[in-house]
Image (tube, rainbow, N blue to C red):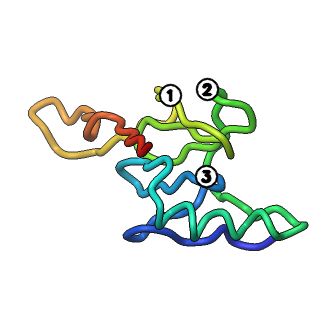
Amino acid sequence: MHQCPRCGLNGQCFGPSICCTGSACRIGHPSDTRQCSMENRNIIPCDIKTSICSAVPNGRCAANGVCCGTESCQTDKNCLMVSNQESDNSREERLSQPEIILFE
């Protein structure tokens, strides 16, 4: 296994046209498609080292609250990242809402 290609600003490819950072995923952006589609030429699939999720087939947590496979992304509460910021009750607070950006 090898690391999946990088894309965008500190992003990682999750499929031939999907680029995700910790906060959002872009699907179909031309520069991401150029970078991420190169992975299709490898006979050994790349290794995505994030948690498994079930919102899409063969999904992996790709961004805060977003589960992606090689073809699509869906929101998935199992992929929500939590922050242990101090508050009056010292409770966990959810980070920003999931974001999936589609380019046509």
| Residue depicted at x 25% and y 39% | 96
Q: Nearer the viewer, residue 9 or 29?
A: 29
Q: Earlier in the sequence, mark 3 or mark 2?
A: 3
Q: Which residue is mark 1?
A: 76
Element on which disc 1 rests = loop
The amino acid marked with disc number 2 is Ala
Q: CA distance from mark 3 to mark 2?
A: 14 Å
The amino acid marked with disc number 1 is Asp
| Residue depicted at x 43% and y 35% | 65
Q: Position of residue 19 (x, y in %)?
A: 50, 56
| Residue depicted at x 37% and y 70% | 9
Numbered badge on residue 50: 3
Numbered badge on residue 55: 2
| Residue depicted at x 30% and y 45% | 83
Disc 3, disc 1: CB below 8 Å? no
The amino acid marked with disc number 3 is Thr
Disc 3, disc 2: CB below 8 Å? no
Residues packed near mark 1 inside 10 Å, few (<14), some (14 to 19) or many (20 plus): some
Q: Nearer the viewer, residue 66 or 92?
A: 66
Dividing the image into 4 quarters, which one contains the N terminus?
bottom right
Farthest right residue in view = 43
| Number of marks in picture | 3
Q: Position of residue 45 (x, y in %)?
A: 82, 62
Q: Please determine whether, in this image, residue 97 is positioned above or below residue 39.
A: above
